[in-house]
Amino acid sequence: MIDDTTATIENEDTQKDKYLTFHLAGEDYGIEIRYVIEIIGIQKITDVPDMPSFIRGVINLRGKVIPVMDVRARFGLDARDYDDRTCIIVVNVDTTEVGLVVDEVSEVADIPESQVEPAPRTNKDIDGSYIQGMGKIGKQVKILLDVHRLLFSGQEMQALADSLEDM
Amino acid sequence: MSMHIDDDQMEIIQEFVTESRDMIEQLEPAIIELGQNSDPETMNAIFRLFHSMKGSAGFLEFTHLTRVAHAAENLLDLIRNGEIALHPEHVTLLCAACDFAKESLEMIETNFTDDSMVAAADAISEDLHQAIEQAKGVASGASQEQPEEESVPPEPAAETTQEAEPEEPAAQTRTAPVTPDSTALGTEPLFPEMEITEEMRNSFVQEGNELLQHAEQGLLAWSERPEDPESIGDIFRHIHSFKGNCGFFGYSQLEQLSHQMENVLDRVKSGSKLTVSNPTDTLLAALDQLQQTVNYIAEGKPPTVDELDHHLSELKSLLTPYIGDLLTEEGVSPEDISTAVSYKKKPVGEILVERGSATAEQVDKALKRQQEAAKQKQTEAAKAPARTSAPPARRQDIRVELGKLDSLINLIGELVIAENMLIHNPDLKGLQLENFNKAGQHMSKLVRELQEMAMNIRMIPVSGLFRRMIRLVHDISVKAGKKVDLQLIGEETEIDKTVIETITDPLVHLLRNSLDHGLEGPEERVAAGKHEKGTIRLSARHEEGEVWVTIEDDGRGLNRDKILEKAISKGLIEGDGSDLTDKQINNLIFAPGFSTAAQITDISGRGVGMDVVKRNLEKIKGKIDVSSTLGKGTIINLRIPLTLAIIDGMIVRVGSTTCILPTLSILEAYRPEPDQITITPDGKELARVRENFFPIVRLHDILGKQPDSRKLSDGILVVLEYQDSRFCLFIDEILGQQQTVIKGLSDFIGNVPGVSGCTILGDGGVCLILDVGTLVESAEDKTQPAQAVEKKQEEHK
């Protein structure tokens, strides 16, 4: 028990300020590393009817069935054919596992809190509510995403959640 | 001592044997450990073993085992209290006691009586007694504390009077009701330093719940047939063990109440009259109170009994005072009475001889004949169980946490998938692999067996669920002033544990409805020419790969006109409903908020119940059939799939998408000829299957996919059935059949219309399992406006 807690604390420590950065439509994004479980190549996605357009379907991750969200579609960006650089980042938020389809995964970057600016309010392409902040590494800027909101906020997701409660 | 052992007792004995054997197995190493270190915890555990073995053996009248266990207990008590030092000999002795107990259990198990073990057991117990006496002598001599010796005799003396009580519960001595009190007082000081751990308390609560539940069932059974002495004996035993447990844990209030109940039961058992002819209600009230307190304990609250005094006096008022007590009050000396009582206990023969009214010879002769008769009966009895259970069933149970079981079953589910992936691996396509196929087949067989076994583990008989309903029916029938005969059939039928939990509420609601609305009052029944007592039959059986749980009453039946009237007034259907079939009308009772009861009673009538029934059954993919004859009664049939996790499925293809249809819903599949298709003027497609027309649902429309061809005659129609509505599903092709493990779609996605879950195919791809229930709704939307309105109503809520 005791060992476990210390391990988590250490983990939290080592994971602090670390972001997994990826490429999407010419921009660099980052998500907190603690949400990321693994990164897999694109694989066969099974369609599920009656879903919002950005939910591409479900995949089989070693026996587990997890839904896949296309982040391009989520941001309302133009669709692009998947290629061999396309990746699925599997994240776990509040025990819900979801795969995120991104153009290309780059690296794990250290962005201390001092280097994170609050999100600008005037981005017309991307709904500002998904953005947690803007991280600076030298001259580069990474858009840091709030994974929780990415997964659960928005009208469509609200509708899904409602349908769940009705059950 | 009874020579005749019936099935019930046999079961109790078997349980006792299993339990004791497990305990011995657990504690034998501990006893040996005692030699090295005298940990008080181990000591207590061993003490408990002998104590409870003694108690149980006492009930079952295995006197020899009782004697040995008692002796061992005494020895341990002395050691524990530090009165004698622990010697290696003691450990050997205790081990010997264990060995003896094991041997006795062996004998009990094979013969079910202690009679056959008399000779062997006598010798062993005699040896042991001597050894213990010797040990005591050695011990007191070694410790050189002679006065300690004095403290020994009163201890066993008190214990033996306690033993006398279960052995001869029917004895009408005045001491009998008093002894348990002295035991109660005696038990507490016996455990001065014992700490009650959380674990112990949990097991107390668990066991207490079981005992009380059994006692409750026994009481109800007894109130039905008061002449049956068996049931009262059962109740007595359960309450007695409960009392024992309470005493052990020091819950004195619980103990008091259960003790008083035991007194009442004892009186009933011995055949003497109570002040009230039917004490069931008072006893049930007390039982409820006990349960309440056990619940307190489970919640960690103090074990107080609410209104203890009230219950105690209620129970006491049931007892008629003993004649002896009254006589004493009248001035007769207690000694005279006890002589009188002991006189009464003497065999009739002896009394006769004493009085000179019969010769000893006559008595001897008569006794011999009696013995012969008894022997004959005994051999008959010995034959009877031999027929029913030729080799005595050796059942060994362990309690397993449900979570572990679930993960085991999940793992096996994964194994089934992995096996599919291996055997149907795309890399193997087109290869001739004779040996591989052989090995594959072998593995498939094993996996299937493993899977069946795993499913079996989760299955429990419905008897527990059914028996809970006895109380419910009893309570409601009293409240509603109706006479009901509840018949339980097929209690041994096994259903998945989760399913049992899910259908508990529906069953309660359905039974309530049957009792409250279905069955008429006695006068009305007699007026209708029926028996005054209504019958409700609750049955379970396996049928068509499902479990059917049926509730059948012989009440007034569903009134079509009343239901229609109500449905129209609630706006559940359009029009006057004259076009609806009886079945559709019967199904209306499951609509939320629907109730035809003229007034709302505290039992039912709010119209919530049937909605719950439907919802819960849908959760486990069950179906409900209602059929009813006005004036004759109603039959409600719950059809539940055997397992939840694995189904047989047919893989079908539309365009590039594959889906699975549950085989159970499929009636047939065929390639339609163009002349079998009819298109109605409003554009609906109907397919003719022999004499019937079924609506066609196009799967590609539901999935939003591009099919190979939109022409019906190019594809295949699968005729599906769901709760007696049938429709055709249009697909491109049938690919094959497969056992599939159902996996839920992620919570993130939620409920998908038309899809009940998904599975993983041999190639590792995810495949959706279609939900015939929602597909049929979309088919019905097209054809039945009434259903659509009902659905809208539901959505509105």
Image (tube, coloured by chain):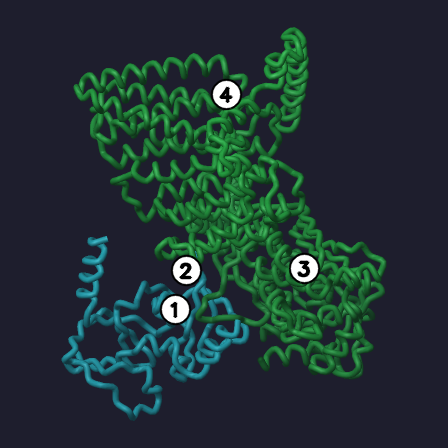
**What is the chain identity of the residue bearing mark 3?**
B
Judging by colour alone, the chain drawn in green in this rendered image is B
Same chain, marks 3 and 1? no
Tell me if label 1 and label 4 are in contact, CB under 8 Å. no
Residue that badge 1 annotates: A99
**Residue A61, label in figure:** 2
Closer mark to the observer between disc 1 and disc 4: 4
The Cα–Cα distance between marks 3 and 2, rounded to whole angstroms, is: 30 Å
**What is the chain identity of the residue bearing mark 1?**
A
Residue that badge 3 annotates: B665
The Cα–Cα distance between marks 3 and 1, rounded to whole angstroms, is: 33 Å
**Residue B107, label in figure:** 4
Q: Identify the secondary structure beneath mark 2.
A: strand
| Colour applied to chain A | cyan
Amino acid type at mark 4? Met
Q: Nearer the viewer, residue B221 or B159?
A: B159
The Cα–Cα distance between marks 2 and 4, rounded to whole angstroms, is: 56 Å
Amino acid type at mark 1? Gly
Task: Give the mark nearer the N terminus: 4 vs 3.
Answer: 4
Q: Nearer the viewer, residue A60 or B300?
A: B300
